Image (cartoon, coloured by chain):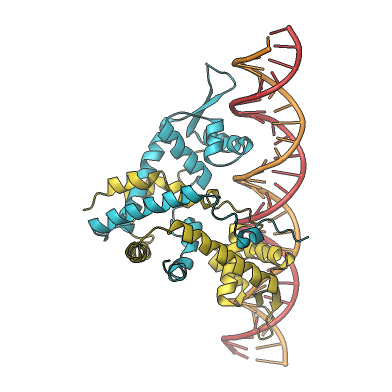
Chain colours: A yellow, B cyan, C orange, D red
Amino acid sequence: MLDINRFLDFIFDDLKKIFFPEEWIDVDLKFSKAEIFSLLLIDKRHEITMSELAEYIHSPLSTATGIADRLTKSGYIIRERSEADRRIVVLRLSHEGSQWIVHLKEWLSGYLRVIVQDLTEEELQLLMAIILKMIRNLEANSGKKLHDSQTDVTLRSIDID
Amino acid sequence: MLDINRFLDFIFDDLKKIFFPEEWIDVDLKFSKAEIFSLLLIDKRHEITMSELAEYIHSPLSTATGIADRLTKSGYIIRERSEADRRIVVLRLSHEGSQWIVHLKEWLSGYLRVIVQDLTEEELQLLMAIILKMIRNLEANSGKKLHDSQTDVTLRSIDID
DNA sequence: GGCATATACTTCGTTTATCGTATTATACGA
DNA sequence: TCGTATAATACGATAAACGAAGTATATGCC
């Protein structure tokens, strides 16, 4: 068993940086987190439905509708009915939306460049391997491993008043 | 120059996991992110003022007041006027609050344990070293390096209507 | 073919958090 | 003691999230 506590101590203070990325990513974005990731998803898939969007951002369709509303109004996405199935709404990026994503990605990679700037090639390789491992662990154990602990039960749904 | 693009490709899809931790941390917490980190801060400092809280969560005092309101109402913190300076409000954890933090930390370390479970001691060491480096880079360059790029300017404050 | 049911979304109203501005209370320096 | 700075709260506006109800379209079944 590794020395977990040491690691815990090490990262405890920096957990906040992970959960509040907005504090070190000091960009005054005009879109919310959900909107940005929606744009990224549309960019990646080229076309998505409202249901796909809702699933991606882990929200009900009513929330997705709100996001699509705002992005459409801003002119960054185009919302159209599918011809094949007229119940379905298809979202695509507008030209402006695509441009914006290009800029976002450039800016993002600039940020990454700064963060990893003096890591050696070996460190970078290892970092990727480690991240991969961690992601695999998380996925393999998600929701499982943790449900049988006492601690976990205590944390869930304690009603006070 | 390292191969940044490869790294970018590698982590792009997982960026969402960082920005939406709630999707893999599947605990139905009764507190919001801001409230949890407020509790953690109070636990760490033992006693804090409203101003310190506001600074920590990067919000105006009016927001901090709302958080303190909710945490006080839930019975997890105690809000008292300082005797030395009666303008100052001091926040402390109640017994229930302390208990809750203990559980949170146990649960957190359980999570970490799962994530790093099959990393070797060397990997763990290196991971910590790399994280440290990255944090230093971030702090050294925060807000600076990125402000002179064209991209960045494009991203900031574009008004549409 | 027609009717019941399912699917894909939107609308609407409620709730909640955030935050700017105004206000209150206290401290402190000249 | 008066003016100003500081610490925090109160209030009102805004925005996002969401559940429930509603609308339109598709599909299965007789």
Query: Quadrant of the rendered structure where residue A67 is?
Result: bottom right
Name which quarter of the figure residue B114 lies in: bottom left
Q: Percent x, y for residue B87?
A: 60, 21
Number of numbered labels in the structure image: 0
Q: Residue at 44% of width from left, 52% of height from top?
A: B137
Q: Which of D16 and A104 is in front in this view?
A: A104
- Above or below for C7 versus A114: below
Residue A118 appears at what percent x and percent y? Answer: 40, 58
Identity of the residue drawn at 61% across and 77% down: A47
**Is D28 located above or below residue B128 in the figure?**
below
Q: Is residue B75 above or below residue A62?
A: above
Where residue B140 appears, x then y in whole percent? 47, 48
Looking at this view, is B119 or D5 the one in front? D5
Relative placement, left or right, of B128 versus B2 is left
Along the line of sight, the residue nearer the viewer: C26 or A141: C26
Q: Can residue A52 be seen in this view?
A: no
Percent x, y of residue B63: 61, 39
Is A62 displayed left or right of A127 in the figure?
right
Decide: is B33 above or below C26.
Answer: below
Left or right: B53 in relation to A4 = right
Residue farthest along the front direction in this orientation = B1
The answer to whether residue A71 of the structure is visible from this angle is yes
